[in-house]
Image: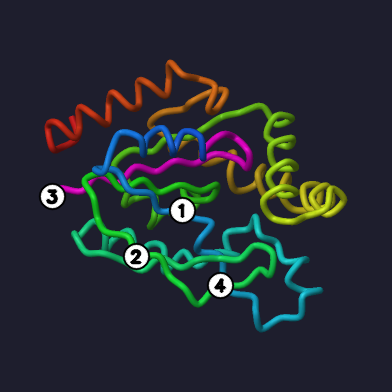
Amino acid sequence: MKPYIIVGLAGGTGCGKTTIAQRLLDIGEDVVLLEQDAYYKDLSDLPMSQRINNNFDHPESLDFDLLIEHVKTLKEGNAVDCPTYDFSTHSRQAETKALAPSKIILVEGILIFAIKELRDLMDMKIFVDTDDDERLLRRIERDIQERGRTFESVRDQYLSTVKPMHLEFVEPTKRYADIIIPRGGENRVAINMVVAKLKRILKKGHMD
């Protein structure tokens, strides 16, 4: 089955990465997904008042050492036990998720291009570039519906950490991308081109 191809999918919060990741996963069983959001550091030893004020948009909030280890392990052809994270309690759960290697390993997350050691493991880097207002609306909807947040908490977090961290750590990493997809999941032409590229890689068994 080797060589394994590592594809990075980055972009700001609410840019449409999830939609694109699902489209790439629909290629078939030869594609697996490794999500950055599963690798947030466990804050269960802190009182809830401190947990909710943690800067979750800073690279230090994530266990990148473990994520890098898992990417390397998958690339070597071995399975990993991915952590699972509870965003309502800001803690890592006891259960893990087994993930077997596949021909294409898709790594998705807002900060994955900001870490050089992780970035250097990638064979293809895709950045999803979506309008800031649209990303904010998607963030509000997701956090309220899926993570049990209030509008006020989402607003305050966006202004205090999400926006400044995006400008400092996410937006600058666009320069590392091999492919930039404007308008996120709505850009069917660009997404179809990426899908076609990955299918060619799967057929040939290597990058061009």
| Callout 3 crowding tier (Cα within 10 Å): few <14, some 14–19, many ≥20 | few
Discs 3/2, front: 2
Q: Residues within 10 Å of mark 4 (few under 14, many from 20)?
A: some
Q: Could you tell me the amino acid type at mark 3? A: Lys
Q: Earlier in the sequence, mark 4 or mark 1?
A: 1
Between 180 and 83, the one lying in front of the other is: 83
Say which residue label 4 marks.
92
Secondary structure of residue under mark 4: strand
Q: In which quadrant of the rendered view does residue 172 lie?
A: top right
Instruction: Say above or below: 39 vs 5.
Output: below
Q: Residue at x 37, y 62 (%)?
A: 68
* Of marks 2 and 4, the one in the foreground: 2
User: Quick one: SS at disc 2?
Assistant: strand
Residue under pointer 3 = 2
Q: Secondary structure at mark 1?
A: strand
* Residue 93 at x, y percent in the picture: 54, 73
Q: Farthest right residue? A: 152
Please report whichever mark, 2 or 1, sits nearer to the chain's N-terminal start: 1
Q: Is residue 8 inside the magenta stretch?
A: yes
- Cα–Cα gap, marks 4 and 3: 32 Å
**Is 76 on the left or on the right of 42, as rendered?**
left
The amino acid type of the residue labelled 2 equals: Ala
Mark found first going from the N terminus, 2 or 4: 4
Segment tinted magenta in the rendering: 1-17
Q: Mark 3 and mark 1: span between their CA atoms?
A: 22 Å
Residue pictured at 55% horizontal, 28% vertical:
184
Q: Amino acid at mark 1?
A: Glu
Name the residue located 49 percent from the left edge and 41 percent from the top edge.
10
Vertical position of residue 156 compared to residue 93: above or below:
above
Task: Give the residue number, with chain letter if any, for mark 1.
Answer: 35
Which residue has dot 2 on it?
Answer: 98
Q: Is residue 46 left or right of residue 150?
A: left
